[in-house]
Image (cartoon, helix red, strand yellow):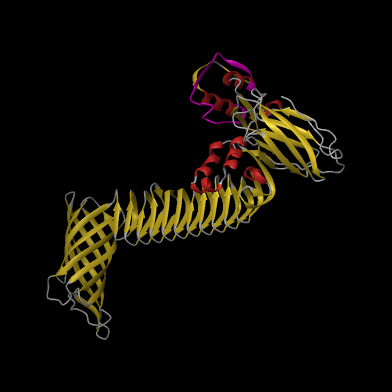
Amino acid sequence: MFISGKSVLSRAFLFITILVCTLPAASQYHLDQEIAFADVSGQPLGEVLHEIGEKNGFYFSYNSRSVVGDSLVSFNGFRGTLIEFLEKTLGPDYEFKETPDYVIIRYAPRSMEVVVETEKESHRSFILKGYVRDSLGARGIGQASVYDRKALVSTLSNKDGFFKLVVKRPGESIWLTVNKENYREMTMVVLLPVEVKRRVREGKYDYYPDEADSSRLERTWIGRFLIGSRQRIQRLNLGGFFAYSPYQISLIPGLSTHGMFNSQVVNRGSVNLIGGYTAGVDGLEMGGVFNINQKDVRMLQMAGVFNLVGGDADGVQMAGVSNHVVGDVSGLQMGGVSNWTGNAKGVQLAGVINMAKEMDGVQAAGSVNVATELRGTQLAGVMNVSSGETGSQIAGVVNIGGKVKGIQLAGLINVADSSDYPIGLINIIKNGRKSFSLNTDEAGLAALTFRSGGRVLYGLVGIGYYLTDRELSYVGEAGIGAHLGNSKGFSLDAEVVNRNITDLKDREQEQASFRILPELRMGSHFSIYAGPSVNYSYPDKENGRIDKIQGWVLYENDSNGRTLHIGLSGGLKYRW
């Protein structure tokens, strides 16, 4: 490798000293630790690495495509440093880096050469120019990431390996780092002219071990559309390295105060006039149209149209149309149309649909809520869906749940594997009770009724016809009931039912009833039941007339036609 320096502005350039190094050559702790273990025979490499990390207080991070954790390894014992073990096990095509919590294994069979020169653009900025070349073939390496960790600026080399990087307000030195997939990382220190009383900025850096986690964002259709190829290459080259900054301002992704490095910077404050693509936010982010974050978001995020987060969101997330979090949410999500996330803990509010895997809290949507497991409550104008463990569901039309712990309240249908407290006209409960009955009452009604529900509550719907001489003969009824007692041969139910009686032309009459129904079982499927009812009848609004009442009348008002009477109902039931 060779390095050249050339002065372009004689007053600006004093000297350049470049120290070329890779991170393993720097001061290390985990890699220099002494490790020892007995003979290993046919044990998966991933298990060996896990045991070493667990015993010494750190984690290994590696790409499963380049380090096969299921591959079997055998040793006749080992004693030495960790880096010696890794070099012996994996060979010379890998490099090893470390952070306080991780030892990073990176496949890097090739090495680079860098030629660099500087010129002073102004008293506040320097320009670094140079070439990135393959050390064996001396050919230029394109799409290599070149960046300064302190100034948080970066660029990509062109197809010939040429790069140009403008560093504003540097300290006394520039830490220039070059990364390229399958190449060994290079870090060099460029010493600049010393300026008296210049304060050196201290930077904060972090490492996220899961490289595949970042690519999840780019696999979404919005991510594929809005994240450019150069920024994707930047992510591949830099891996899990991230820096922190107080703020950033952008017009669109890539056109920001951090330039192309914005996808690797976590900001406390982020303002995106149209939209922006950053590593994450630990404070406040506002986007006129959209916000895109490669990793996590904390505290408050607001966008005019949508938020897209590749990691987790912790705090409040608001969007005019949609919030999409690839990881998990803890806090509040509010979307004008939709919210999409992995696991959620807190509240999701959406105009149309909420989607989550495990939901621990409240989902409220104008149309649909979907969760794999629900420990909380779903409120939807149309439908709630949960396939696993489920809390309470309240929907205008349909609830679909797994093992429901709370209530299911639906305007029409409840479906569940198990649900003790379904409240709906039809309740399809896998381990619940269902029955058809032929029944009659004191007024000569012949009716067919379907009852369905859980261990405690059930719903009923029925149709019937009065066999006696009446002006209004056709009946439709619906209601809910409760199993008050249950033994091997006897049970006791209570029902609240609303009955609509009509001539199918222009007259109708309503009747609300409360029934107590003792039931005697005859075998495993059939039973007979009969019991008293209290009925309150009121006529149609147009003529105020009520059809004649059978039974014991407790109250009758001739002026409004309303009547309270006691009746009797019973029937034959087939249950399953």
Residue 479, position as x, y percentages in the image: 28, 64
Asked if residue 90 is positioned above or below residue 242 in the image, the reply reads: above
Residue 131, position as x, y percentages in the image: 70, 32
Residue drawn 60% across the image and 26% down it: 108
Asked if residue 58 is positioned above or below residue 155 in the image, the reply reads: above
In the rendered structure, does residue 81 fall within the stretch colored magenta? yes
Residue 117, position as x, y percentages in the image: 76, 34
Residue 343 appears in the figure? no
Q: Left or right: 196 with respect to 457?
A: right
Image quarter in which the N terminus is found:
top right
Which sits in the foreground, 155 or 442?
Answer: 155
Q: Which residues are magenta?
A: 55-83
Q: Left or right: 49 with respect to 531?
A: right
In the rendered structure, does residue 442 fall within the stretch colored magenta? no
| Furthest residue in direction top, as rendered | 76
Residue 309, position as x, y percentages in the image: 55, 48
| Furthest residue in direction bottom, as rendered | 559
Residue drawn 57% across the image and 19% down it: 89
Asked if residue 422 is positioned above or below residue 562 in the image, the reply reads: above
Residue 241 appears in the figure? yes
Which sits in the foreground, 264 or 329?
Answer: 264
Determine the image quadrant of residue 467: bottom left
Determine the image quadrant of residue 465: bottom left
Which sits in the foreground, 72 or 359?
Answer: 72
Q: Left or right: 538 with respect to 263?
A: left
